[in-house]
Amino acid sequence: GRDVLDILLLDPARSAGAQVFQPCRAVAVEREGDCQAVRIEARDCRDEATILRAPVVVAAHGSWEPGPLPSQLEKKSRPSDLLGFKAHFTGSSLAPDLMPLITFPGGYGGMVTADHGRMSISCCIRRDRLALLRSGLAAERGGHVSAAEAVEHHLMATCRGVREALEEASADGPWLAAGPIRPGIRAGYEGDIFRAGNAAGESHPIIAEGISMALQSGWLLARQLDDAQAGQAGRQAAGRRYEAAWRGLFSTRILAAEAIARIALGPGGAALMEAVVRNFPLALTLGARLSGKTKPVPGLVEGRPTPSRQAPLE
């Protein structure tokens, strides 16, 4: 799970010399000569701030939470927004070698066996559909119904696979929520700020490539910064190369994910997808290719970095 992965990534970064400020958030970025000054604040202490200065700023804050940074997206609310939900269960009957896609009225998701024998369910559901589910269930039960309760009830009522997988299972912690998701391709470098992960762009999670794309985009950016010349002109050139590499690696899978998501969310989506896979089994292989699961990452040979020029930024 992400709780384990985050630690696996953070600890080596700290050991390599990265200074970690946690729990903090960046609240402002201002230019100071050829450097950027980033103001960070502790989560529970807004009266005290720390200023970090560096020639290179990388925004990797995702796309879901609004904020004051120029790299953060404007908050918008639409009926068609897809809200994300996730929960873990123990005692599931899901086979460990399966990662099924689930579709249901108003959304889609997936199930997978995670660490420590837990089974994870992740899904997205339209904002307007969720509102209808909550109001209907509240009227039926005669009281307040949380979003998580409505989502779980909807999954159990409409997905046979979910019912079977959870028949003898128990919840391992509460449901988690996030979103709305913001699929699309954004600027990888703008306003002298580099963007990685979902800040640069994201696909519909129907192809389960979110974390992979985030890690790969970080790798692409690191390679370009490693070869960049000092000064803003060097950063601009690195930004252009990074955006080109990013689009070359990810644009096809983002478009493919959008097409698959449209089918899943449309009328009769589940039946249509089942018919395609049953009659054209090679559609699974094609889907894997289009979603980037078989595409090598530039600069990696058999999982190892290839040498690059050393031209550190100053």
Image: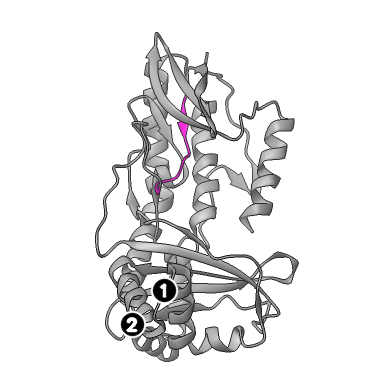
User: Which percent across, then down, holds residue 185?
Assistant: 33, 48
Q: At numbered mark 2, what does the secondary structure look like: helix, strand or loop? A: helix
The quarter of the picture where the N terminus appears is bottom right
Q: Residue at x 63, y 47 (%)?
A: 301
The amino acid type, in three-letter code, at marker 2 is Gly
Horizontal side of residue 265 vs 15, given as left or right: left
**Callout 2 environment at 10 Å: few (<14), some (14 to 19), or many (20+)?**
many
The amino acid type, in three-letter code, at marker 1 is Tyr
Residue at the spot of label 2: 269
Q: Is residue 65 above or below residue 224?
A: below
Outermost residue on the front side: it is 142
Q: Residue at x 36, y 89 (%)?
A: 271
Outermost residue on the top side: it is 33
- Select label 1 or label 2 by which is in front: 1
User: Which percent across, then down, holds residue 162?
Assistant: 53, 83
User: Which percent across, then down, holds residue 25?
Assistant: 50, 33
Q: Is residue 170 above or below residue 196?
A: below
Question: Is residue 114 located in the magenta-colored stretch of the structure?
Answer: no
Tell me how far mark 1 sits from mark 2, CA to CA.
10 Å
Q: Residue at x 54, y 54 (%)?
A: 212
Q: Residue at x 63, y 65 (%)?
A: 173
Asked if one can make out residue 52 in the rendered structure from this viewpoint, the answer is: yes
**Callout 1 environment at 10 Å: few (<14), some (14 to 19), or many (20+)?**
many
Toward the viewer: 211 or 142?
142
Tell me which segment is drawn in magenta: 57-64
Q: At numbered mark 1, what does the secondary structure look like: helix, strand or loop? A: strand
Toward the viewer: 145 or 27?
145
Residue at the spot of label 1: 108
